[in-house]
Image (cartoon, coloured by chain):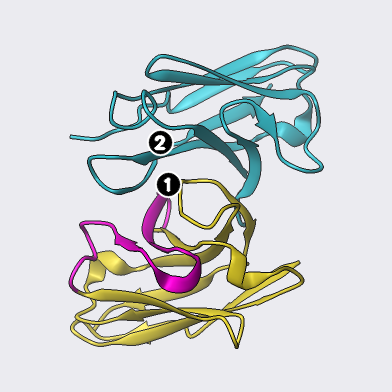
Amino acid sequence: VQLVESGGGLVKPGGSLRLSCAASGFIFSSFNMNWVRQAPGKGLEWVSSISSRSTDVHYADSVKGRFTISRDDAENSVYLQMNSLRAEDTAVYYCASGIRERPGGAMDVWGQGTTITVSS
Amino acid sequence: QSVLTQPPSASGTPGQRVTISCSGSSSNIGNNTVNWYQQIPGTAPKFLIYINDHRASGVSDRFSGSKSGTSASLAISGLQSEDEAAYYCAVWDDSLNGVLFGGGTKLTVL
């Protein structure tokens, strides 16, 4: 059972990035998926969730209108398209799988994280 | 405003029992189930407790969770040095329509 994130890096304010998370070892299509971030020296902050079959998507107010979550069950992958990036988006971004079809805060498998730095 | 409040720090000596609280409101803890995570510095969070008091697979029975009204607690018995970590509560919030994490509690084993 594994989640592997990719796509992190250094980006200028106002720029865009697309994070990917590849899942293996479990029935990906059956579970909700989440993105959670952690700014340097800070706590965990939920970013976005998507239910199984993509029926529901949810976003934190801090990213609503700028970030888009999506999933491809054929590829066992979830994505986070991040636009209009700001300095305050600088963080380690974790992909995490939920334990049910719909999100609810329970995330049993976590990736290793990918770092986003937004700076000029 | 939807907030989950945790004490910023907690401590105990080896063998002791410590509890970490998580205080919320009717829109989150009062109406949904609570989850707990452990994060050792430099590593990804680890799933500990779900549905208030269910231990995740492979989690030691020294860890237990409880919920009452709009508050929840994580208890760690027989404290060990390896328990030194940050602990976070997390719950769905009906007002935010999203997941709420507590601010985290840094546990120090003295």
First to last magenta residue range: A40-65
> Chain under label 1?
A
- Is label 1 in contact with label 2 (beta carbons under 8 Å)? yes
Chain displayed in yellow:
A
Q: Name the residue tied to disc 2.
A: B102
Q: Mark 1 or mark 2, which is nearer to you?
A: 2
**Is B8 left, or right, of A94 in this rendering?**
left
Q: Residue at x 32, y 39 (%)?
A: B93
Q: Is residue A96 magenta?
A: no
Residue A68, by quadrant, is bottom left
Q: Name the residue tied to disc 1.
A: A43
At label 2, which amino acid type do we have? Gly
Q: Secondary structure at mark 1?
A: loop
Residue B52, by quadrant, is top right
Q: Quadrant of the C terminus of chain B?
A: top right
Q: Colour of chain B?
A: cyan
In terms of depth relative to the viewer, which is nearer, B50 or A66? B50
Between the C-alphas of marks 1 and 2, the distance is 8 Å
Q: Residue at x 36, y 64 (%)?
A: A56
